[in-house]
Image (cartoon, rainbow, N blue to C red):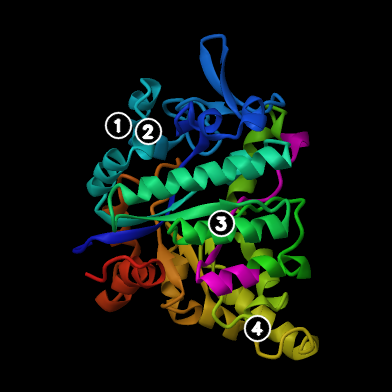
Amino acid sequence: MQHKVISADGHIDFPLLPENLWRDNAPAALKDRMPRVIERGEDRIWQSAKGQTLGLVGGMGSGGRRYVPGQIHRSDRMAEQGLYADQSKGIMRPTVPELRAKDQDLDGIAGEVVYGILGAANRLEDPEVTACVLHIYNEWLSDFCKAIPGRFAGVGCISSLSPDDAARELREIAALGLKGAELGLSHDMLPMWHHEWEPVWQASAETGVPVHLHTIGPPIDNRWYGDTKTRRPWFATHMTGFQINMLTVLAGVIFGGALERHGDLKVVIGESGIGWIPYVLERMDYEWEDQFKDVVPRPPSEYWYGQMFATFQLDRTGIENLHRIGVNNVMWGNDFPHPDGVWPDSQDLLSEQFAGIDAATVRKVTYENAARLYGFPMD
């Protein structure tokens, strides 16, 4: 690529956050119920007060896994840049603004949208603690983003355990100056078409803070995951459907009528990929025309084009179908520092992915769309 880009999908992971963050900032009544670091053999592990493991301190990705050389190519590329070696020494580069910016400079990233810790927070098994942890994190993220103005757009976290609580925290997120709110997806939550989400949609429309729904993939099936003979083929199948799983989220948002009721509402589906979207738009419009005109008054694809966005990393099929997806509805991201991302090779991979695509389109997808939505400088 010949110009710097904005990554519309980056992450702060729970295992990389300061160890004293939760207990130092929790009210007295909750301090003993906050996540803490314990020793387990030679490992230091994040654990909830109820004993749920939240990952290795300095571990890899949202789950805090151990880095194993030769297991994942992308992890090996990240290890070559010293990322995991530093984390093992307590130097958490992704959670130090200056070090994160330096790492993203290496990848040609001028600005970054930063998602949060909902994967871990959803495992705390204590609604009161979850709400407290997310609020503490959102305050921390606000300070993180303010350390280098114009460099990071923080997406705060709101829990899916209570729509009313989520709406209240979304308004707090707006007051903190964060640029988005991520509603934590889980496989047992209310579906996105459900009317009980209305407080969240209303709060988002009134504050101008877009709702973000980040992919979590299909459910984990422990019948196969725990068996050494079945784990690898199951996991390969799981990862293949990891992004396409978001089709029910996209359709649910639209058929639930939130976008019809709130014309100013914006919704982002994060790390969803985009190649599958044209078919889903076509399918929704067909079903609407055939039997569901009572659900929403306009063709579903119109709501997509007017009010929704999706992010991707590698998706040549999607790029070749941007005319059907909507060039204004798509944003690229490098998924730093996750092992299924593209850091530190974004520039080479972008050049390959966008080969033959006109410069104006490339500019929109890799910079302008994110700049408009999140308020980055329009260089």
Residue picked out by circle 3: 182
Residue picked out by circle 4: 260
Q: Is residue 342 visible?
A: no
Q: Earlier in the sequence, mark 3 or mark 4?
A: 3
In contact (CB < 8 Å): disc 1 and disc 2: yes
Residue at image point 59% right, 40% down: 133
Q: Position of residue 39 (x, y in %)?
A: 56, 13
* Residues at marks 3 and 2, CA–CA distance in whole angstroms: 29 Å
Q: Is residue 102 above or below residue 304?
A: above
Q: Position of residue 257 (x, y in %)?
A: 70, 79
Depth check: give the residue in front, 178 or 315: 178
* Disc 4 versus disc 1: nearer the observer: 4
In contact (CB < 8 Å): disc 3 and disc 4: no
Q: Earlier in the sequence, mark 3 or mark 1?
A: 1
* Residues at marks 3 and 4, CA–CA distance in whole angstroms: 21 Å
Instruction: Indicate the amino acid at tag 4.
Output: Glu
* Residues at marks 3 and 1, CA–CA distance in whole angstroms: 31 Å
**Which quarter of the rendering shows the C terminus?**
bottom left
Instruction: Indicate the amino acid at tag 3.
Output: Glu
Instruction: Indicate the amino acid at tag 1.
Output: Glu
Q: Position of residue 375 (x, y in %)?
A: 35, 68
| Image disc number at residue 80 | 1
Depth check: give the residue in front, 53 or 144: 144
Q: Earlier in the sequence, mark 4 or mark 2?
A: 2
Residue picked out by circle 2: 76
